[in-house]
Image (cartoon, rainbow, N blue to C red):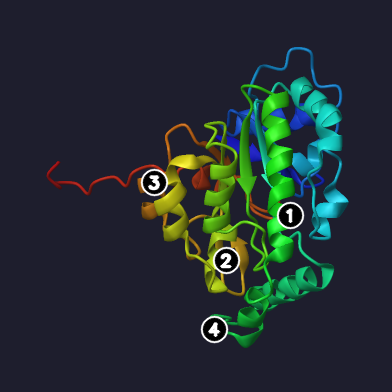
């Protein structure tokens, strides 16, 4: 079990301090998720850093492309392979999370962001004309982006044998990845075992609230491909909330999640440490009531 570095906020920016505090809370280490910078000191981590104390690292942080990610643009390029993999090796991590998200025309990305803002304010967008219109945009640009993503992943997997690569679809209604495109991507690349899915529980709920494929469809088709999960929840009008306080179906996720998948508690910095430790237990099987037959 890992703790997302974003939870520390401005209170603890250094890698050594984050590792120490996460251990005090009972975590194995930390993980750098999409849209989070590398912790201070990550360029020169402690010499005694043990393997996998950093459970996963997002590609936009490794490639120094956070600005592109914040703007909803592409964060992956083969030009970044050398420097990014060197940073990953120094962190002694063997998993990367590649945020795919919305990589289409800027106008479409902005429309998608506005829809997510409306969702954040508690509006119900199922069947909304603005969503339907956006989803009916021509797919030609998406096909080109998918081909370039496939080329990048092919180069990444060849450059780093043994690396686990998890794709993060994001929450945008114009995200490049949907279940059909993910299946197509796997087929093009020969279904490599090292390529999988990063499951962000809050993003999955936001996608479903927009009328996009629900979590059950993703899990039914690709549950065995999940390499890691961000433990957080989402509630209309409240945004990211602790697991169990939102709309996520944790029993369903427990049914599909591989035992080997990395678990990362991913709550905002405003949440106290007590909530963080409680969130770590969300995937444990429910205890039987006293006197219940086993």
Residue identifier under label 4: 127
Compared to residue 275, the image places residue 263 above or below, namely above
Q: Position of residue 170 (x, y in %)?
A: 65, 57
Q: Secondary structure at mark 3?
A: helix
Frontmost of labels 4 and 3 is: 4
Compared to residue 84, the image places residue 274 above or below, namely below
Give the camera-side residue of 37 and 196.
196
Q: Where is residue 42, by image quadrant? A: top right
Q: What distance separates the C-alpha of mark 3 from that of mark 1?
A: 29 Å
Q: Secondary structure at mark 4?
A: loop
Q: What distance separates the C-alpha of mark 1 from that of mark 4?
A: 27 Å
Label 4 vs 3, first from the N-terminus: 4
Q: Residue at x 76, y 72 (%)?
A: 108
Q: Residue at x 59, y 47 (%)?
A: 185
**10 Å crowding of disc 4: few (<14), some (14-19), many (20+):** few
Label 3 vs 1, first from the N-terminus: 1
Which labelled disc corresponds to residue 145? 1
Which labelled disc corresponds to residue 42? none
Residue identifier under label 3: 256
Q: Secondary structure at mark 2?
A: helix
Label 2 vs 4, first from the N-terminus: 4
Frontmost of labels 3 and 1 is: 1
Residue identifier under label 2: 207
- Asked if the residue at tag 4 contacts the one at tag 2, i.e. Cβ–Cβ closer than 8 Å, the answer is no
Q: What distance separates the C-alpha of mark 4 from that of mark 3?
A: 28 Å
């Amino acid at each position: 079990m890992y703790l997302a570095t974003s939870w520390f906020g401005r209170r603890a920016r250094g890698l050594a301090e984050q590792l120490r505090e996460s251990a005090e809370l009972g975590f194995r280490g930390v993980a750098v998720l999409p849209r989070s910078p590398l912790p201070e000191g990550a360029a020169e981590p402690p010499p005694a850093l043990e393997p996998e104390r950093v459970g996963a690292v997002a590609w936009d942080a490794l490639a120094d492309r956070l600005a592109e990610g914040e703007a909803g643009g592409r964060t992956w390029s083969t030009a970044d392979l050398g420097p990014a993999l060197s940073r990953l090796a120094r962190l002694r991590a063997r998993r990367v999370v590649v945020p795919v998200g919305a990589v289409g025309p800027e106008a479409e990305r902005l429309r998608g962001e506005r829809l997510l803002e409306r969702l954040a304010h508690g509006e119900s967008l199922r069947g909304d004309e603005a969503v339907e219109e956006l989803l009916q945009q021509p797919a030609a640009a998406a096909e080109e982006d998918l081909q370039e993503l496939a080329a990048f992943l092919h180069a990444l997997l060849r450059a780093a044998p043994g690396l686990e690569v998890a794709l993060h679809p994001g929450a945008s209604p114009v995200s490049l990845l949907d279940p059909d495109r993910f299946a197509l991507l796997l087929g093009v690349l020969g279904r490599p075992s090292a390529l999988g899915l990063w499951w962000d529980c809050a993003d999955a709920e936001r996608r479903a609230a927009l009328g996009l494929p629900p979590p059950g469809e993703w899990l039914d088709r690709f549950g065995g491909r999940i390499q890691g999960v961000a433990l957080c929840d989402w509630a209309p009008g409240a945004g990211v909330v602790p697991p169990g306080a939102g709309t996520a179906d944790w029993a369903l996720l427990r049914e599909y999640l591989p035992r080997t998948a990395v678990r990362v508690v991913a709550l905002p910095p405003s949440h106290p440490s007590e909530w963080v430790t409680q969130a770590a237990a969300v995937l444990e099987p429910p205890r039987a009531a006293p006197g219940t037959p086993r």
